[in-house]
Amino acid sequence: MMFSPRLHAVTCSSPAGLHRMAYHEWGDPQNPDVVLCVHGLTRTGRDFDLLARSLGTRYRVVCPDVVGRGLSDWLAHPSYYAVPQYVSDMVTLIARLEPGRLHWVGTSMGGLIGMVYAGALAQSRLKAASRTPTQQHTAVPDTHLRLDSIVLNDVGPHLEPVSLERIGHYVGESVQFSSFKDAVAYIRETCASFGPHRPEQWEELTRHVYIENNGKWVKHYDLSIGAAFKQITPELASQGESLFWGAYGSIAVPIQIIRGEYSDLLSVQTCEKMRQIHPHARFIEVSGVGHAPTLMSPDQIALIHEFLISLG
């Protein structure tokens, strides 16, 4: 059975004002069992089309375009293109969705957002335990913020500098092409670490990150994201890593870690440390792939299916 996604938007806020975050929804809109798929740095939620179509018979699958990408609004101040803002937007989205169960699938940046969301959720529960007597005896409605499992696709609390340098070379680069074919060739070159894909799959990986504008094919994201990315100093990176490790350690739900065999972002050493912190985390390495597995092939889609089904 073929499914078509429904396009929605939710209004979020930043210190600079309001912005809309677009998201595509697959499956029964009344299904309380939600899979939230969050994409990488310069990608869009449409990266998950094949996965969402496969999962849509059993789950409600929601795939947002993180602010500044795809169909979502751009931020007035590029300095807010950062994980805390993205987490805030996801909190707004999850409150809108009112899930009965929430399964997070995060690729690269999407996994970092998921880890920090998990950390924020853990902190909120600690605060809930110390409510005042009045708060404890007042029936405040549930906000539906929850997390029941998380898939971290080729990402962990430590990001290898060599990968960040590689990504920094092309993120925010102002390039345009006279044909869609040329845009596909560019994606094949800059995203070669995705591993082998059929020609039509490379077209799908290009279709939603390049759009035609005045006869030219241009990037479908705010190029200011590149400026924000390049402003990350070693000191800020160190502070961020400390935050990520703390957030990862606070995760209290089943975890699946997926690593591309040749990943230059998620090292074997980082995976080993992650498994020491959470010994019961499921770890899978995808052969023949770098950063990051696209979750488009049947065998990669099966990894998500099997993990979710194992949860009952």
Image (spheres, rainbow, N blue to C red):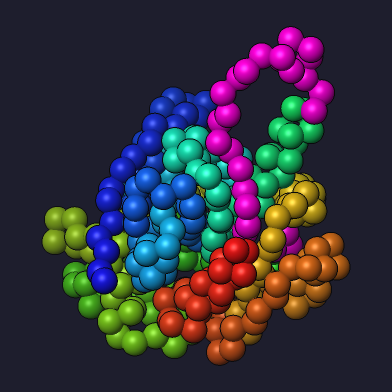
Which of the image's four quarters has the C terminus?
bottom right
> Does the magenta run of residues contain 247?
no
Q: Residue furthest front?
A: 312
Corner quadrant of residue 274: bottom right
Q: Is residue 187 above or below residue 17?
A: below
Q: Residue furthest right?
A: 276
What residue is rendered at 44% in x and 40% in y? 97
Q: Position of residue 252 (x, y in %)?
A: 75, 52
Q: Position of residue 153 (x, y in %)?
A: 59, 68
Front residue of 154/299: it is 299
What residue is rendered at 69% in x and 61% in y? 254
Q: Position of residue 47 (x, y in %)?
A: 39, 65
Which of the image's four quarters has the N terminus?
bottom left
> Does the magenta run of residues contain 138?
yes
The answer to whether one can see residue 80 in this image is no
What residue is rendered at 59% in x and 88% in y? 287
What residue is rendered at 19% in x and 72% in y? 179
Is 21 on the left-hand or right-hand side of 130? left
Q: Main secondary structure of the magenta part?
A: loop
Range covered by the magenta-colored residues: 129-158
Front residue of 143/236: it is 143
Front residue of 227/163: it is 163
Q: Position of residue 303 (x, y in %)?
A: 55, 76
